[in-house]
Amino acid sequence: MNERDIVYKITPRVDWEAAVAAGHYAGAPIDLTDGFIHFSTAAQADETARKHFHGQHDLLLVAVRTSGYGNAMLWEVSRGGALFPHLYGAFDMESVVWTLPIETDRAGVPHLTFAQAGT
């Protein structure tokens, strides 16, 4: 398995619960505005959490399999010139490998714990 097999989405728990009820995740408001779901690799996710989710609480880290999305899953240049995974469309719950709560410290800084998930 390589780093492109599983990608990660950070989302508020309330948004995730709505997606589970709907049977698919169509994206956060920023995703809907941009026209694709923003994902990160394991190496990128911590910086993404700190940069875009500082001060937010009750967040989840969602691991998603990329197989089956074909040309809808693109790796595009983003922050710092790095390639980030973007999904042009929704993903279904069958693609989800696991979800984990994201802990935040007293200053509101999120801390990801991939070790707990075996990733």
Image (tube, rainbow, N blue to C red):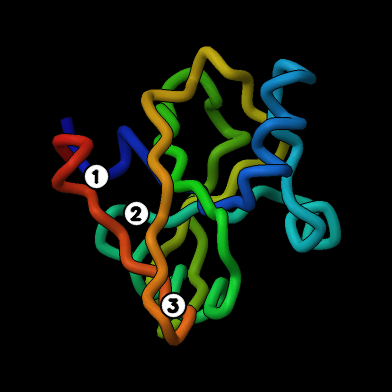
In the picture of the structure, the residue carrying the numbered disc 3 is: 50
Q: Is mark 1 on a helix, strand or loop?
A: loop
Residue 62: x and y, percent? 46, 39
Residue 36: x and y, percent? 71, 50
Task: Determine whether, in the image, residue 13 is placed left or right of residue 113.
Answer: right
Q: For the image shown, how many numbered marks are present on the structure?
A: 3
In the picture of the structure, the residue carrying the numbered disc 2 is: 41
The answer to which of marks 1 and 3 sits earlier in the sequence is: 1
Q: Outermost residue, front direction? A: 106
Task: Determine whether, in the image, residue 90 is placed left or right of residue 53.
Answer: right
- Mark 1 touches mark 2? (CB < 8 Å): yes
The answer to which of marks 3 and 2 sits earlier in the sequence is: 2
Neighbour tally class for label 3: few under 14, some 14-19, many 20 plus, Cα within 10 Å: some
The numbered dot on residue 60 is none
The answer to which of marks 1 and 2 sits earlier in the sequence is: 1
> Can you tell which of label 3 and label 2 is closer to the viewer?
3
Neighbour tally class for label 2: few under 14, some 14-19, many 20 plus, Cα within 10 Å: some
From this view, report whether residue 23 is shown above or below residue 1: above
Question: Separation of disc 1 and disc 2 at Cα?
Answer: 7 Å
Q: What element carries label 2?
A: loop
